[in-house]
Image (tube, rainbow, N blue to C red):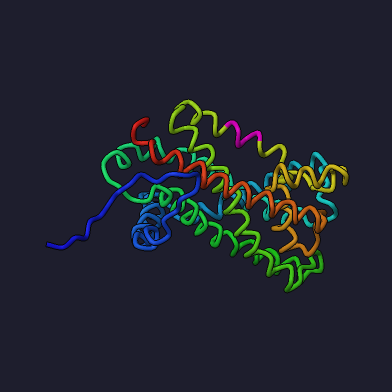
Amino acid sequence: MSGRETIIRPSTGWLRFDLDLLWRYRDLLWSLVFRDIAVRYRQTVLGPIWLVAQPLAMTGVLTTVASGMAGISTNGERPELFYMAGMVAWTYFSSVVYAVAQVFTVNEYLFSKVYFPRIFMPMSTATSYGFGVLIQLVPLLLMTLVFTLSGSAHPTLASLMTLPLALIQLVMIALGAGLLIASTTAKYRDLVNAAPFGVQLWLFVTPVVYSLSVVPAEFRPLMAFINPLAINVELWRYGVLGSMAASPLDLLLSVISSTLLFVLGAVVFQRVERTAADTI
């Protein structure tokens, strides 16, 4: 008889990610991503076209009302590109935060019956909504091409190459914020209802409707650290417009803040998931 034995111990410490386990479950992750995409657009008339219709409609409204009627400054940039770039970033952020915030309540039946890395649920949500961003980039880049040929936009190859980096940072911000909210909703269910209200308030402190240039320069570094999404929106606009109001210091503080938010969200989530089945 072999003397080999397996000892199973509960994980301890604040940060214990089993990367080997995550790799072994990678097929499950992609299955969850494809499931999310299929369920989201099943039995819809327009399907993924809704992904393009929403930011385009909001861009039209903001261009007409905010820029045309209210006279809100876009810092001298084409309002169509200004608002479209902001809406692509904001639509992804708000959708992912709200969906991830409900991960414990929506998947209560699943978490209490079978084991798999719980982090896969928010990861699949962030990835499936990333599919929508790729679709939205098509009309955004087409608009950029049209306005560039007309001479009213001046993007460069370097600025366009920042769009993938802007997407990576956007995923970190949305996923980090969503994980933190989800970790609290595992015990306090009513916070799920507060999440949409919090996201709406977040819109007002993020330069989606207005330009970052209206914020006094001395307050922008503080804003960049407290709300990294503000600089991320400017980074999206830089990709298609070739200019932005953020400084290199603002960008650095935003990246640091985004990383801290993502790590903090992951740490808190993996602590809560150990006992979530006992509370949900």
In-front residue for pair 246/79: 246
The magenta stretch spans which residues? 197-201
Q: Can residue 176 be seen in this view?
A: yes
- Location of residue 250 in the rendering, given as x and y in whole percent from the top left corner: 78, 52
- Location of residue 217 in the rendering, given as x and y in whole percent from the top left corner: 87, 46
- Asked if the magenta segment contains residue 199, the reply would be yes
- Location of residue 120 in the rendering, given as x and y in whole percent from the top left corner: 41, 52
Decide whether the magenta segment is chiefly helix, strand or loop. Answer: helix
Which residue lies at the image location 68% right of the left edge and 55% below the top edge? 85
In-front residue for pair 55/277: 277
In-front residue for pair 46/278: 278
Q: How many marks?
A: 0
Q: In which quarter of the image is the C terminus?
A: top left
Q: Is residue 136 left or right of residue 82?
A: left
Which residue lies at the image location 68% right of the left edge and 44% below the top edge? 61
Which residue lies at the image location 54% right of the left edge and 48% below the top edge? 175
Q: Quadrant of the N terminus?
A: bottom left
- Asked if the magenta segment contains residue 216, the reply would be no
